[in-house]
Image (tube, rainbow, N blue to C red):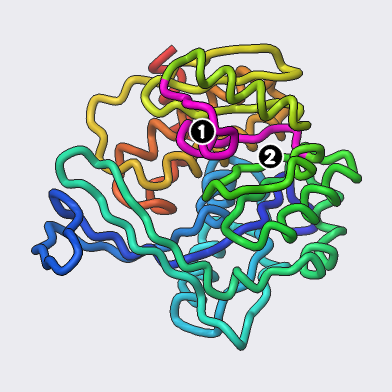
Amino acid sequence: MDRADIVVLGTFVADLAFKAERLPVVGETLLGQGFAMGPGGKGSNQVIAAARAGARSAMITRVGQDSFGDMARQTWSRDGVDTSHVLIDEAAPTGAAFIFVSSRTGDNAIIIESGAAANLSPADVRAAEGLISGARVFVTQFEQPIETAIEGLRLARGHGVTTILNPAPALPVDDAIYVNCDFVTPNETEAATLTGIDTATDEGALQAAASLVRRGARNALITLGAKGALLHGEAGTHFVPAFKVTKVVDTTGAGDAFNGGFAVAIAEGRNPVDAVRFGAAVAALSVQKPGTAPSMPTRADIDAFIRANG
């Protein structure tokens, strides 16, 4: 691939998902109701979501020289992701994630170890500047070192590339990071952590979004689960409802599906509100299947879903 529409800087981890009625307490052992292993990591999930939604997509990351790293490369190859800036780290293993999935609600709880991707450096990003400069959208998160994410955002903005920061997991950061963000896309829990504002109400979510904009972001886009999403900033203020889903199977990766879909729509030149709706459709489809990367829908499925649901 000589050029990518969307470049994602982030992690790959092997998802180890356990299904049970609840999490065990310390010292307790529970019998599970299902287990699955598959590709994951926020960056990888987002690049796969973008690729399946129709964008030429590229990944910047590090993986280990091990079976999980082999899984990563096979996963990206199947979806046509550019891996020219995926580095093999001989000193660290590929990351992994423990995922608890509730058999009653489909909700999840996750522990992640970034592994080799924790060694991603600003120098690694600078080495990919040619790839980044030719993109339409650059996406990153907080699973790799913060200084590496900052360098990616800085380089992308310097080349006029639209930047999306998905600040997950939410960590204390200097406000300077937001200056290079066209869109900051936390969920409601992450927005509360970043701003110290309770986002349980629409008013609180708007106050949190306004706080992120005051700190320098051009737009804050807070996902609100089944309530939809709030977009606030240069694009105006808009509450965008979620699509109704009759049966939620697994919410793991729904945020990554949203971000990948949103990035694709922005890269295609859609206005931000339409892009939010497109991202919401990708997320709605993803929660109807188990897993993270395996649940990401194709462009044909997305377009059909949007037509069927107005």
Looking at the image, residue 299 sits to the left or right of residue 248; the answer is: right
Look at label 1 and name its amino acid: Ala
- Between residue 134 and residue 92, name the one nearer to us: 92
Circle 1 residues within 10 Å: few <14, some 14–19, many ≥20: many
Q: Which mark is residue 192?
A: 1
Look at label 2 and name its amino acid: Ile
Residue found at x 30% / y 25%: 245
Looking at the image, residue 58 sits to the left or right of residue 194; the answer is: right
Task: Return the x and y of residue 210 as percentages of the image width and height.
Answer: 66, 21
- Between residue 84 and residue 9, name the one nearer to us: 9
Q: Are marks 1 and 2 in contact (CB under 8 Å)?
A: no
Q: Which residue is mark 2?
A: 164
Which image quadrant for residue 276?
top right
Residue 299 appears in the rendering: no
Element under disc 1 = helix
N-terminal of the pair, mark 1 or mark 2, is 2
Verify whether residue 117 appears in magenta.
Answer: no
Residue 31 appears in the rendering: yes
Name the quarter where the C terminus is drawn: top left
Residue farthest to the left, as pictured: 31
Element under disc 2 = strand
Q: Which mark is residue 146?
A: none
Task: Return the x and y of residue 132 as percentages of the image width and height.
Answer: 81, 53
Task: Return the x and y of residue 247 as percentages of the image width and height.
Answer: 23, 31
Q: Which residues are magenta?
A: 181-200
Residue found at x 41% / y 25%: 305
Above or below residue 100? Residue 210 is above
Distance CA(mark 1)–CA(mark 2): 19 Å
Above or below residue 29? Residue 23 is above
Verify whether residue 194 appears in magenta.
Answer: yes
